[in-house]
Amino acid sequence: KTSSASKAKSFGPETQPDWVRDLYQQAEDFPEEEYLKELLKDTGGDPAKIEANARRKLAQNVGEANKKTFEGEVVGAEGQGQHQHELAQMHVRFDEVDTFNLWIWFEFFSEPSEAEQEMLASVLDAWFVLGKLGSFNTVNLQISNSFEHSTSFFQYDESCLDTSLPAMFHEMEEPEFSGRNGRFWVNLGTCDEIALDLLINALHNFSNEYVSIRTLQIGGKSLASGTLDGWEAPARPTPFKQNADQVREINESIADDLSRIYNAEEGESNSQFQ
């Protein structure tokens, strides 16, 4: 008679952690438990893929349990015929966009934990670093635009790296959270709008794999859904307005100095005639 430990090793890849082999054993011992099959499906025993399946399942359960109202439609008993992943589908909305003074807003299906907030902040930091290094430059997309050539042995033209105009982020602030809502401010600088496309792609998969996002809003001074009254973006001048204000202040300072000099010279002139 074999021990339970030796029996566990007979299930799943032998090179994987014990908990992975235990899952395979449980799936074998309890074939009626469908959720175990879903966790292991198409993973090949890869722990990272199993964890991704678990997070995806959790997000689906959260969306179903809370019966969220999405764009005027209640997802609950009426939505049981839909695929479960549709219950947590991220909706993308665009409001007024100023790329030099841009607020990006989140509405989550449930209030994110501190750890989940840090995960999202890490994604945004990675996006910003790429933008700060000039990654989002549509002028130099040689490989993507080489429709008639294979990537293998591709002849890359390094001169384009120096001749294309710089496309770099300027600033980004840390994200803020309030209940089921979040936001962050960014100045895209000279970066191309492809940066927003890539951010949306990343957040779509982040929402599916980690923290379910109900709505992603690009631009605007507040969430259009109005789920949190009074949480509006603080007023801040754009760089152009800041520069204009600085120029105005300099002009006024010069005018004051000239006026004082003129008045002083006029006073000296009058005293000489007296």
Image: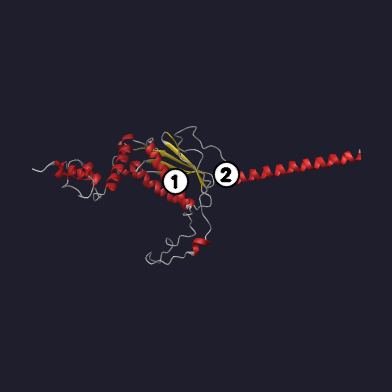
Horizontal and vertical percent for residue 133?
Answer: 48, 53
In this picture, residue 174 sits left or right of residue 39 = right
Q: Crowding near pointer 1: few (<14 within 10 Å), some, many (20+)?
A: some
Q: Is residue 71 visible?
A: no
How many discs appear? 2
Residue position marked by numbered label 2 in the rendering: 238
Q: Tell me which amino acid carries mark 1.
A: Asp
Q: Tell me which amino acid carries mark 2.
A: Thr
Horizontal and vertical percent for residue 130?
Answer: 45, 51
Q: CA distance from mark 1 to mark 2?
A: 22 Å
Q: Is residue 160 visible?
A: yes
Give the secondary structure at mark 2.
loop
Q: Quadrant of the N terminus?
A: top left
Residue position marked by numbered label 1 in the rendering: 125
Find residue 32 and report its image quarter.
Answer: top left
Which numbered disc, 1 or 2, marks the residue that appears first in the sequence?
1
Horizontal and vertical percent for residue 143?
Answer: 42, 62
Identify whether 88 is placed above or below 153.
above
Residue at image position (31%, 35%) is 65
Give the secondary structure at mark 1.
helix
Identify whether 159 is placed above or below 3.
below
